[in-house]
Image: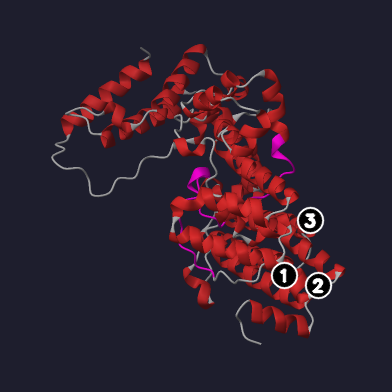
Amino acid sequence: MTRLACATLLVLAGSAAAQKWESPPAIFLSPVVPPGVRLLSQPAVQADVGLTAEQKAEVVALNHLWGQSPRTWETALVPPEVARAAVAHVTQEFLARGLTKEQRTRLDQVVFQLREKEFGAHAAFAMAARDLGLRADQLDDVHNLKGLRVEEIAKHVTSGERFERVKTKVAATNGETFEKMTEMLTRTQRERLRDLKGKPFEAKLDLAGQAEAPAPRKYAPHLFGMYDHEIVYLAHPAVRAELKVSDEKAKFLDMAVKFQERDPEKQHELIDLVRTHHLTPEQRARLDEIMLQRRELASPEVMCGHPAAVAALKLSPVQLRQLREGKSVPDVLTKDQLARRRELLGKPFDLPADIEDPLIGRPARVHVKSPDFAFARNFLVLANRIGLSEEQIKKFRELAEDEPKIKELIQRELSLSDTPPVAGATRGLTTMTAVMDQYQMALEEQCWSVLDAQQQSTARKIFGRGR
């Protein structure tokens, strides 16, 4: 047992003995794992910082402790809250006293540089405000600059320009924000900023590999050899657009959706009926590819349990039963079947994010938008009914292609922002949500502006928005 593990147990016992835990605290927030602890488990960081063999053993023990559930420590005398707090205490002790001053300095520099790469130089600067010793007036300036940055990003994402140009302008805004932040620094503060960065850390890290292996998931037996969510996906405009479903066929699909809502147990019979009588062979093949991609997100085993995969791979009843019982794909499929499996997925398709699908981690949610909200894909589905020209279809496709990319850009740039809107109806929202709403409204306006007056009138009737 390492010195760290012994110290942890002593802290646990001391904490439990010093407190009478007759009732747990009303609110408990689990301590956040210090980023330095995770980084120190990386060989490249260990070499750069210069850890000794003993220090490496301490890091391994620390990460092991953080990876355990607090319930593992629970005894009659030690509640989980005390256990987790003890682990946090020992971690801080190691970072403060288990490393030399030079090692702590270098570790902080590596953390700072990684924050710059992940969040941007402007964000890393704001996070280091205390270390830089910013005055009150400088802190106010930083706050104002972050607010101006949000306004600029909102202007770029709602401009109607293509994603690549928007992305370039947002990057330029981030650079300008950082430059303005550094302009306010004194000579001493500039030296501190330089010391915070230190010499460049060029090594590539594999932080994803540190994640705890998830517990094996068990899926309902009906997912193997049966359809399950096809009707729900066929109700979505994006899927219908991908399959090129005609307006006439869309009416039958709407009826199937209503039948399934009334009697969910009939979904397998319904999809068989829809596939046989209302989808062309090409549409059936593409729908199968989309649903196989969806199941692949859950697991390769569930993907192989889809009827289309069962038929294409010619799985035997024994193989299907083995998959159902939890055996892995490499253990069940032959070499030829394994080679064929990847070919079944077809061209990648972006699954609609607003479909409730627990299989891939999308549980039921509260929808705040109207289902008739005019996204570009909605208009593409109605291309024939409203008489879109080739140029108009091209524009809608561009809007539809850029929409998820711009939303991801907004989330990445503003999800960590601490500059909330201060004026107007959005003052109660987070920055990211407010800008996302602005983009949604701008996108709708851009969609309507593509249409001429007659097309707008037709589309509004279809969407139930009057003339």
How far is mark 3 from mark 2, CA to CA? Answer: 26 Å
Residue lying at 31% horizontally and 17% vertically, measured from the top left: 6
The residue indicated by pointer 2 is: 388
> Which secondary structure, mark 3?
helix
The residue indicated by pointer 1 is: 382
How far is mark 2 from mark 1, CA to CA? Answer: 8 Å
Q: Earlier in the sequence, mark 2 or mark 1?
A: 1
Residue lying at 45% horizontally and 62% vertically, measured from the top left: 366
The picture places residue 192, in percent across and down from the top left corner, at 61, 43
How far is mark 1 from mark 3, CA to CA? Answer: 27 Å
- Whether the residues at callouts 2 and 1 have beta carbons within 8 Å, the answer is yes
Q: Earlier in the sequence, mark 3 or mark 2?
A: 3
Residue 144 appears in the picture as rendered: no
The picture places residue 446, in percent across and down from the top left corner, at 73, 73
Tell me the magenta residue range: 344-369
Residue lying at 71% horizontally and 65% vertically, measured from the top left: 381
Instruction: Pick the residue in front: 104 or 258.
Output: 258
> Which secondary structure, mark 2?
loop
* Dominant secondary-structure state across the stretch colored magenta: loop
The residue indicated by pointer 3 is: 164
Q: Quadrant of the C terminus?
A: bottom right
